Amino acid sequence: LKRGKGWNDKSVADATTTVRMFVEFRGDVAVDQVTNADARDYKEILLDLPKLAGKGRYARLTVRQLVAEANALEQALNDGTIAPEGVHGVHRDDDDGTWHVERYSLTTVNKHLNFLNVIFGEAMAYLGRDPDSSVFANQLYEKSLIRKHRRKRRAFEVDELERLFRSPAWTGCVDDRLRATPSDRPPPRDARYWAPLRSEEHTSELQSRSDL
């Protein structure tokens, strides 16, 4: 696949993670035993996965455990058991004031489904079947729906930005791999450090122009 599809090392690593997650969900079964219902059910659970899966409180959890942890956090935030201060990957609904854990975007879901579709297509071809018979072929979201979904994304509130930029990733962390762990060492000044800052500066500039 790396040669045939032109995947780079990151794509291979992402695809490996996607396969591992699906095996956790469905079990280690033969490719031709995975049904359309399995693909549909996996698509549904991807939509429930927390955006910060694999990080912090979500580290080293299975797919179902990730959803359970996100749901539990959401419940705890809304019943007052956990204070929202310092909790990342959550937002408060502007209309009813309820707290919600940020989940996978349609773009992220599509990325996982596309990796599986390519891999299953190659596997079906290897078995002498039609490569277009992958059960994931019809599960991808249309690009028009993804664009519409992106436009509906909410803007960050000032207090959310303040919490974000007071976190160890911007004030001082152990290293690039442990950005959430506080340290006296300065944070890595790479793209992950600068991109949110520059994005916020750009947004503020546009807002200032619109106010003139």
Image (cartoon, helix red, strand yellow):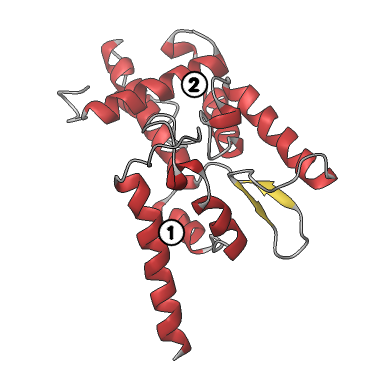
| Farthest-out residue, bottom | 212
Q: On the rendered structure, is 115 left or right of 2?
A: right
- Report which residue position mark 2 lands on: 21
Mark 2 surroundings: few (<14), some (14-19) or many (≥20) residues within 10 A? some
- In front of the other: 119 or 210: 210
What residue is drawn where x is 68% and y is 48%? Answer: 85
Q: On the rendered structure, is 199 left or right of 81?
A: left
- Res 41 quadrant in image: top right
Amino acid at pointer 1: Arg
From this view, report whether residue 5 is shown above or below residue 162: above
- Select label 2 or label 1 by which is in front: 2
| Farthest-out residue, right | 79
Is any part of residue 64 visible from this angle? yes
- Res 169 quadrant in image: top left
Q: Quick one: quadrant of the N terminus?
A: top left
Distance CA(mark 2)–CA(mark 1): 26 Å
Mark 1 surroundings: few (<14), some (14-19) or many (≥20) residues within 10 A? few
- Report which residue position mark 1 lands on: 147
Is any part of residue 140 visible from this angle? no
> Residue 49: x, y in percent?
58, 35
Dot 2 and dot 1 residues touching (CB under 8 Å): no
- In front of the other: 58 or 131: 58
From this view, report whether residue 146 is shown above or below residue 103: below
Mark 2 or mark 1, earlier in chain: 2
What residue is drawn where x is 58% and y is 28%? Answer: 58
From this view, report whether residue 150 is shown above or below residue 183: below
> Residue 204: x, y in percent?
43, 73
| Farthest-out residue, front | 184
> Residue 29: x, y in percent?
49, 8
| Farthest-out residue, top | 29
Label 2: state its secondary structure. helix
> Residue 48: x, y in percent?
61, 37
